[in-house]
Image (tube, rainbow, N blue to C red):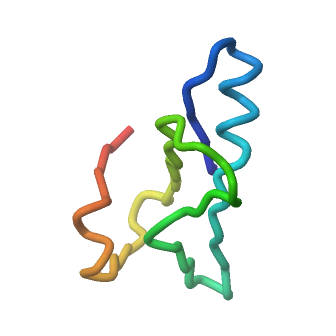
Amino acid sequence: MIERQAKGASEARARVHAEMAEYFWLQKDSLLELDKIYSLPTPSKIRDQKVIVRISVPKGKVVQVDPDLQRYVRWSVN
């Protein structure tokens, strides 16, 4: 699940700002490729935009994370 967040004068404006954040990912078979960054179209202003990627992995499956992404990853077990 890809979740976008941002700030704005109202909830509706914050939603518009959040939706401007462009984030790309690709799935090839069992490989999931996630970009390290997101971008904003010009002339968008910075409104504390955030992109949160939530991935659910079945119990017993192995996950390998590229070392370049390690600092961006937070694990939780539900």
In the shown orientation, is residue 26 left or right of residue 7? right
Outermost front residue: 43
Residue 23 pos. (x, y %): 63, 63
- Quadrant of res 63: bottom left
Q: Residue at x 33, y 82 (%)?
A: 66
Q: Is residue 40 left or right of residue 78?
A: right
Quarter of the picture containing the C terminus is top left
Residue 67, picture quadrant:
bottom left
The correct choice, above or below, for 71 with respect to 47 in the image is below
Q: Residue at x 59, y 43 (%)?
A: 45
- How far across and how far down the image is residue 14, in percent? 66, 25
| Side of 62 relative to 43 (left or right) | left
Where's residue 18, x and y in %?
A: 65, 39
Residue 38, located in which quarter of the rendered image? bottom right
Question: How many discs appear?
Answer: 0
Q: Which residue is pictured at 64% across the width and 52% down the height?
A: 21
* Closer to us: 46 or 61: 46
* Residue 9 drawn above or below residue 44: above
